[in-house]
Image: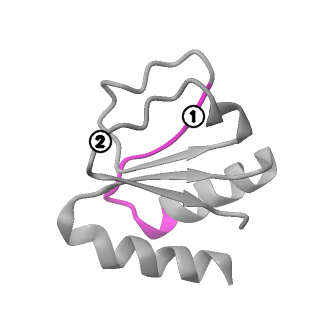
Amino acid sequence: CFYENLEIIIDKHDEIKNKFIIFCSSNDDVQGLFLHLTEKYITKKVYIFKEGNNFSNLDFDILICNQNAEEGLNLQGRDNILIFFDL
């Protein structure tokens, strides 16, 4: 299951305080993943990328993005882990 594999990755890197940026191909996947992760990780700051928002100063643990975020989102930072959910 995609969710279980994702949880393994998040749990493995959780102690290092990495930030996770997860790309999904559809808005339905974004919404479903958001609901799942907010229930599973109640102490983490989980956000959905919305066009026009400035995430450079946002304090997040997990950022879930659709294909619209693939351009223009600054992903620099050594603590970021990028995950392509649908692949």
Location of residue 2 by image quarter: bottom right
In the rendered image of this protein, does residue 18 appear above or below residue 14?
above
Q: Which residue is mark 1?
A: 49
User: Which mark is in front, 1 or 2?
Assistant: 2
Write down the region rendered in magenta: 39-50
Q: Is residue 52 magenta?
A: no
Which secondary structure lies at badge 1? loop
- Residue 71 percent location from the top left of the image: 62, 28
Amino acid type shown at disc 1: Phe
What residue is drawn where x is 48% and y is 76%?
7
Which secondary structure lies at badge 2? loop
Amino acid type shown at disc 2: Gly
What residue is drawn where x is 77% and y is 51%?
25
CA gap between label 1 and label 2 equals 17 Å
Location of residue 84 by image quarter: bottom right
- Residue 8 percent location from the top left of the image: 45, 81
Q: Are marks 1 and 2 in contact (CB under 8 Å)?
A: no
Q: Residues within 10 Å of mark 2 (few under 14, many from 20)?
A: few
In the rendered image of this protein, does residue 80 appear above or below residue 16?
above
- Residue 5 percent location from the top left of the image: 56, 81
Tag on residue 19?
Answer: none
Residue 1 horizontal side relative to residue 48, left or right = right
Q: Which residue is mark 2?
A: 77
